[in-house]
């Protein structure tokens, strides 16, 4: 595999971002974003980077509060730093793409002379923490993150592009606690058996209700000025979460104090785009819970009565990279 010395046009890089899954490197053991496939004279040998059979074809949706979105209409402002923060509704990994013009961008692409960015990989400014050489040893569900840097080769533009991808926050064992009907039934029936009179008429919650309730607690933490406490004996809390989910709750930022849980200390006055680590974590987890809710059966989704509004990031990613007028970019799957 050869290093990306020849560079990539913006539409190709955008297409590769949709297909790049750091958890599952390609069959040839390369990094789809920063490597080019081998060139072969023999037509029977592969000249493309073969995808792993379980590789995710991402569908990116916005994380609104972490974005500084480019204007959809008009040319890019070389004085502005545009950023698009997104998550994949399928695999729940996170992406932040930012682009700026540190050299002033006298004539930023796309222009009449240079209709597309041509990006060169900058290894010295990157941190590819997932190494293709040891890809087989990487836990696909473990924590990972990767920062890659590129620069437009056009002197009049010199746009600097950064992509930051990271793993989902919710681990498989936590997702099991939230969605496994047997585990939910076990903890709900335990709570009901300890105080039958108090829980009379209550039913075991559906996985969609568990996901939705945790998501509501997080949204309230992001919206309410005063830090709330939740009684550890709250009936909805016990049926859906309780002490069985303590590790997950502490990771998100909940704190147990005697017989209460303090909600995460979000900064509700933070300006957008948010940079406060607690706010970023809470929005990330909220979006992951939403993705999991979307994957539940239709009857469960109807029962939870949750609004599932998502905003596709595709047009904003295309605009940030100046490919909004490319038919291929606008019609990516």
Image: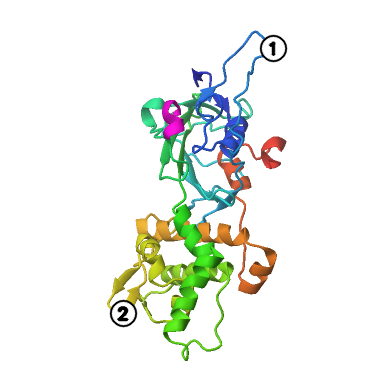
Q: Do we see residue 269 in this rendering?
A: no
Q: Is residue 27 above or below residue 194?
A: above
Return the x and y of residue 319 as percentages of the image width and height: 60, 42
Q: On the picture, is 19 further left or further right than 191?
A: right
Describe the element under mark 1 as helix, strand or loop. Answer: loop
Of 28 and 69, which appears nearest the observer? 28
Crowding at label 2, few (<14), some or many (≥20) Cα neighbours within 10 Å? few
Q: Residues within 10 Å of mark 1 (few under 14, many from 20)?
A: few
Q: Left or right: 243 with respect to 120?
A: left
Q: Which residue: 56% across, 25% down?
A: 8
Say which residue label 1 marks. 43
Above or below — where is 188 with respect to 124?
below
Q: Position of residue 151 (x, y in %)?
A: 47, 29
| Numbered range of the magenta stretch | 132-137
Tag 1–tag 2 contact (CB < 8 Å): no
**Residue at which label 2 appears:** 259
């Amino acid at each position: 595999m050869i290093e990306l010395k020849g560079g990539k046009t913006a539409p190709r890089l955008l297409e590769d971002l949709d297909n790049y899954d750091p958890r599952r490197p390609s069959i040839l053991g390369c990094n789809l974003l920063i490597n080019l496939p081998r060139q072969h004279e023999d037509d029977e040998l592969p000249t493309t980077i073969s995808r792993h059979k379980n590789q995710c074809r991402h569908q990116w949706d916005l994380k609104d509060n972490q974005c500084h979105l480019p204007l959809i209409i008009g040319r890019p402002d070389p004085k502005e730093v545009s950023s698009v923060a997104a998550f994949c509704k399928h695999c729940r990994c996170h992406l932040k793409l930012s682009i700026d013009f540190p050299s002033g961008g006298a004539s930023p692409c796309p222009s009449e002379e240079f209709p597309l960015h041509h990006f060169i990989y900058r290894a010295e400014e990157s941190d590819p923490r997932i190494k293709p050489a040891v890809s087989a040893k990487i836990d696909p569900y473990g924590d990972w993150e990767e920062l890659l840097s590129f620069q437009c080769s056009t002197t009049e533009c010199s746009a600097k592009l950064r992509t930051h991808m990271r793993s989902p926050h919710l681990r498989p064992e936590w997702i099991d606690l939230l969605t496994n009907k047997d585990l939910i039934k076990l903890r709900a029936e335990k709570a009901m058996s300890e105080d039958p009179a108090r829980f009379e008429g209550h039913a075991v919650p559906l996985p969609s209700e568990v996901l939705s309730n945790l998501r509501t607690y997080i949204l309230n933490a992001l919206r309410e000025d005063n830090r709330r406490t939740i009684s550890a004996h709250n009936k909805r809390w016990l049926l859906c979460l309780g002490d069985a989910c303590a590790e997950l709750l502490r990771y998100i930022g909940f704190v147990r104090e005697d017989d209460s849980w303090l909600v995460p200390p979000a900064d509700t006055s933070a300006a957008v785009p948010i940079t406060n680590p607690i706010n970023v974590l809470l929005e990330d987890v909220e979006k992951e819970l939403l993705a999991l809710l979307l994957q539940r059966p239709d009857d469960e989704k109807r029962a939870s009565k949750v609004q599932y509004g998502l905003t596709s990031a595709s047009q904003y990613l295309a605009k940030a990279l100046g490919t909004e007028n490319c038919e291929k970019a606008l019609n990516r799957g």
